[in-house]
Image (spheres, rainbow, N blue to C red):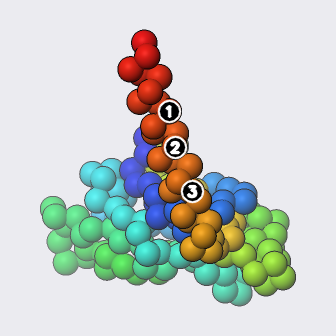
Amino acid sequence: MKIISNNKKAYHDYFILETFEAGIELKGTEIKSIRKGSANLKDCFVRIKDHEAFIENMYIAPYENGNIFNHEPRRIRKLLLHKKEISKLEKKVREDGLTIVPTKLYFNTSKAKLEIALAKGKKLYDKRNDLKEKDAKRDIEKALKRAY
């Protein structure tokens, strides 16, 4: 599994409850651009419309060796999920007030896959607690390293 893009901001802003693996419907030059590593998950989100899942605002850079048929960088792309998964996601978003965020873009064998997650937004004090815990772990690691 080769990770292309990781959405660290999602882990900072949300509590990740459950993850799903989804395929992405791509056009010709998009896959070439992703293989080159020119994709970004920052500020993108997943929306469910008419029992289909779409990822919006995902940036895939135009392929530099492409021609006039090159793709639009921030177009809406369809996600490939099973009907049961989509209905489960739709139910959770509607009833529980959760959101769906993309967390990773990677290659599974030769196919580009997107890991999406059901997430609950963090409050400011939750983010502060996470930063405190991270700093404490870092300090402990440094102390252990010095001890040995």
Q: Which residue is mark 2?
A: 136
Q: Quadrant of the C terminus?
A: top left
Q: Callout 3, which amino acid?
A: Asp
Residue 130's disc is 3
Q: Quadrant of residue 117?
A: bottom right
**Vertical position of residue 92 compared to residue 107: above or below:** below
Q: Which residue is drawn at the image coordinates 39% and 50% (left, top)?
A: 4
Relative to the observer, which residue lies in front, 50 or 14?
A: 14
Q: CA distance from mark 2 to mark 3?
A: 10 Å
Residue 140's disc is 1
Q: Is residue 1 something that shows in the picture?
A: no
Q: Callout 2, which amino acid?
A: Ala
Residue 74 in the image, given as x and y percentages of width and height: 37, 79
Q: Secondary structure at mark 3?
A: helix
Relative to the observer, which residue lies in front, 54 or 13?
A: 13
Q: Which residue is drawn at the image coordinates 43% and 16% (left, top)?
A: 147
Q: Callout 1, which amino acid?
A: Ile
Q: Which residue is drawn at the image coordinates 72% and 60% (left, top)?
A: 17
Q: Earlier in the sequence, mark 2 or mark 3?
A: 3
Image check: 93 left or right of 74? right
Q: CA distance from mark 1 to mark 2?
A: 6 Å
Q: Quadrant of residue 20?
A: bottom right
Image check: 33 left or right of 145? left
Relative to the observer, which residue lies in front, 36 or 95?
A: 95
> Given contact means CB atoms under 8 Å apart, are the residues at marks 1 and 2 in contact?
yes
Residue 52 in the image, given as x and y percentages of width and height: 67, 78
Q: Is residue 98 something that shows in the picture?
A: yes
Counting labels gives 3
Q: Earlier in the sequence, mark 3 or mark 1?
A: 3
